[in-house]
Image (tube, grey):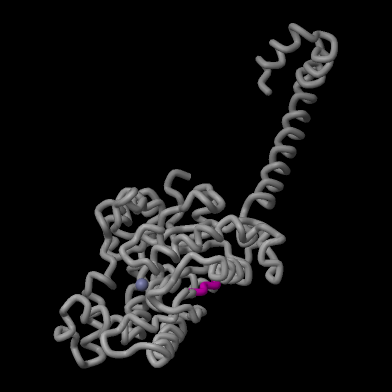
Amino acid sequence: MSLIDLEMISAFRPSSLDRIRNMILGTGAATMKSRNRFSTILLFAAWLVYVAMLFAFASPALAQNKPIHVIAFGAHPDDCDLGAGGIASKYAILGHKVKFVSLTNGDVGHQSQHGQELAKRRRDEAQEAGRRIGIEYEVLDNHDGNLLPTLEIREQVIREIRQWKADIVIAPRPNDYHPDHRYTGVLVQDASYMVIVPHLVPDTAPLTRNPVFLYYSDRFTQPQPFRPDIVVSIDDVFDKKINMLDAHVSQFYEWLPWTEGVLDQVPKDRAARKKWLAEWPHAARKLQPEWREALEKRYAAQAATIQHAEAFEITEYGRQPSEEEIRVLLPFFPPNPSR
Ligand SMILES: [Zn+2]
């Protein structure tokens, strides 16, 4: 309430408000000393309110300076790696906790293998990929190409998010060419409020704060294009990301090149094929022109030198982070130049 407000109200209720006004401003011989004391009390109270709000509304990681917990979902064992392998590496280097979860076991997408044989191979590749950058990787046993947004799988997603005590959840947008990707987006979207509801999935304790939910970047434009709210440079970990992708032999050196008719271009030599992978547009994630603005917002002059990045959209269903919280939960940006 401003002094002008007090003046206006006191015109209508002189007796009590005059007393308040006098307490604040002093009467007649009121001294600067009492005003200063009041200012000090006011500042202290504002600081207390600020600290209380920080604890009340911020993530557990933000409030208690604990490791940040990130969980990313993909439909297949390699999807998370493509969308967030770079920032996962960056979190792991800083000692934060990252888990990738594939909702299907990948037992279909291959030109010659299928079934349990392929599922085992895909699970082993995912484990190796996670090991290479120091994160956990879980492959759930739902069939590839058959994913549907069922209550059973929604509950699997809710349990994963709760057990990981996630501060950040990453998933595809529910608009995609592949039905498994699309339904992964729907399943995580459907879980994004339910993770805090106590009597739902009662075998796993609910979260006390809704996480921040992010979407991976994509190229789809209907019903609306991806919005790059957060763009993170991965130049410093690009080799680690390629090394992670290189673990998915059945995907990047067999299945995807086969689907694109370039299988004969994949080098046989291990070092040569990794170099080929680093230049393949699927893996390279070169900076998109429309990401530039968000990149410059947080990297300022450094943005001009950045070659590779990962971009994320903040979904409107989870907790909505302030700029300050974005910088705490994604601790990769140079200090805010505006401060
Ligand atoms: Zn996929």
Taking depth in this image into account, of 295 and 154 the one nearest to the observer is: 154
Assign ligand 1 to one image quadrant. bottom left
Q: Pick the quarter of the image with the N terminus.
A: top right
The residue that appears at 28% across and 51% down in the rendered structure is: 290
Image height of 131 relative to 87, above or below: below
Image height of 71 relative to 228, above or below: below
Is residue 99 rendered magenta in the image? yes
Q: Is residue 82 visible?
A: yes
Is residue 259 rendered magenta in the image? no
The residue that appears at 44% across and 62% down in the rendered structure is: 185
Taking depth in this image into account, of 181 and 335 the one nearest to the observer is: 181
Magenta part mainly helix, strand or loop? Answer: strand
Left or right of 41 on screen, residue 119: left
Left or right of 123 on screen, residue 26: right
Quadrant of the rendered structure where residue 125 is? bottom left
Quadrant of the rendered structure where residue 116 is? bottom left
Quadrant of the rendered structure where residue 9 is? top right
Q: Is residue 30 visible?
A: no
The residue that appears at 65% across and 58% down in the rendered structure is: 196
Q: Residue 183, image x and y in percent?
A: 43, 64
Image height of 53 relative to 27, above or below: below
Q: Residue 62, image x and y in percent?
A: 61, 58
The residue that appears at 49% across and 81% down in the rendered structure is: 141
Count up the numbered dots.
Answer: 0
Image height of 46 relative to 304, above or below: above
Taking depth in this image into account, of 125 and 139 the one nearest to the observer is: 139
Q: Residue 213, image x and y in percent?
A: 50, 57
Q: Residue 11, image x and y in percent?
A: 74, 6
The stretch of residues the image draws in magenta is 96-100
